[in-house]
Amino acid sequence: MPGLTVDTHFGRLVRRWGLTQQTDPVKVEADLAALIPKSDWTMFSHVVIFHGRRTCFARRPACGACPLTRWCPAYGEGETDPEKAASLLKFELAPGAALPDPLPGPLPDDA
């Protein structure tokens, strides 16, 4: 059954992105349910939560290593230098996997 999981990371990020101003999880869920197609609720929740755990941290977001910078109204709240931001990232690699060189950065402009 699809659903929006409004945990700490999810609530923080959707407020940071300007998708809601609510702090009550039930109200956050209602606001996002009106914006996101029901078929995407579960995957959207997973993606937002993982992004909050690995890149867009509460105290010091890794803005310079974030693939969403072009759309993020909160860009610049955290470290914007790409190398310094990359050092803040938290993730687990599969056994035997290596980091890409260079690390992927923001998407190029559409111009």
Image (cartoon, rainbow, N blue to C red):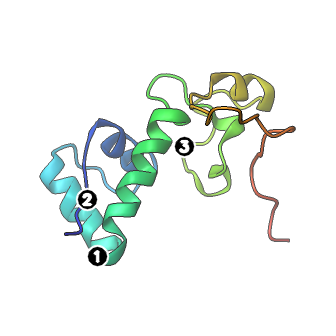
Q: For mark 1, what is the residue?
A: 38
Sequence order check, earlier mark of 1 and 2 = 2
On-image quarter of the C terminus: bottom right
- For image coordinates 38% across by 50% down, the residue present is 14
**Amino acid residing under circle 1:** Lys
Q: Is residue 73 above or below residue 87?
A: below
* C-beta proximity under 8 Å, tags 3 and 2: no
Whether label 3 touches label 1, CB < 8 Å? no
Circle 2 residues within 10 Å: few <14, some 14–19, many ≥20: many
Question: Which one is closest to the eye, mark 3 or mark 1?
Answer: 1
From the viewer's perspective, tell me whether residue 44 is left or right of residue 98: left
Judging by the rendered image, the residue that carries numbered circle 2 is 4
Mark identifier at residue 63: none
Local SS, label 3: loop
State which quarter of the image contains the N terminus.
bottom left
Query: Mark 3 or mark 2: which is in front?
Result: 2
Q: Is residue 83 left or right of residue 90?
A: right
Mark positioned earlier in the residue sequence (3 or 1): 1
Q: Position of residue 108 (x, y in %)?
A: 82, 59
Closer to the camera, 93 or 105? 93
Mark 3 is surrounded, within 10 Å at the Cα level, by few (under 14), some (14 to 19) or many (20 or more) other residues, namely some
Type of residue at label 2? Leu
Query: Residue 64 or 75: which is nearer the viewer?
Result: 64
Look at 52% across and 36% down and name the residue there: 56
Q: Secondary structure at mark 1?
A: helix
Residue that carries the numbered disc 3 in the rendered image: 74
Is residue 5 something one can see in this rendering?
A: yes
Q: Amino acid at mark 3?
A: Ala
